[in-house]
Amino acid sequence: MGDMTYDEIKSLKSDIQEFSLTLKKYGEENSSILRENDISFFNFISKRIIFFKYFYSESLPYGTNYFCQVLISDFYYLIISLIKHEMRYVDVKMISWTRFGRI
């Protein structure tokens, strides 16, 4: 996995801006007005999603790919649940034990 080129970075920035617009529309559809600080936070999360997608590779050690997939899914779910004003219940102890193979 090599370094990203300027064109790839420019494309990703464009994708993040497009994703932000999509989130604004989704917020309006769900009676949620997203402020600038909301969009900024979602952009922050989007960059983490991109990092884990970039990091995700078939050559990673066993279990790492699953860990990346779960994090990506959790980040998407976090964004959607925040826009919909849903409560999220997470058993942190159970997640940390099961994800790292201690149960």
Image: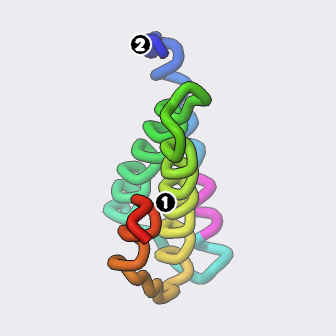
Task: State the CA–CA distance, disc 2 to disc 1.
Answer: 24 Å
Is residue 80 left or right of 92 when viewed as pictured?
right
Is residue 42 left or right of 18 when viewed as pictured?
left
The numbered disc on residue 19 is none
At label 1, counting other C-alpha atoms closer than 10 Å, the crowd grade (few under 14, some 14-19, many 20 or more) is some
* Residue located farthest toward the right when viewing the structure as drawn: 29
Residue 80's place in the image compared with 84, above or below, is: above
The residue at the point 36 percent across, 60 percent down is 36
The residue at the point 46 percent across, 84 percent down is 88
First in sequence: mark 2 or mark 1?
2
Task: Look at mark 2 in the image and give the residue it sits on.
Answer: 3
Which SS does the magenta portion mostly show?
helix
> Which image quadrant: the C terminus?
bottom left
Residue 33 location in percent, x, y? Answer: 49, 75
Secondary element at image label 1: helix
Is residue 62 left or right of 48 when viewed as pictured?
right
In this view, the residue in front, 95 or 49, is 95
Q: Which residues are magenta?
A: 21-26
The residue at the point 35 percent across, 58 percent down is 41
Residue 36 highlighted magenta (yes or no): no
Task: Look at mark 1 in the image and give the residue it sits on.
Answer: 75
Residue 40 location in percent, x, y? Answer: 35, 54
Q: Can you see residue 13?
A: no
In this view, the residue in front, 74 or 95, is 95
Residue 19's place in the image compared with 91, above or below, is: above
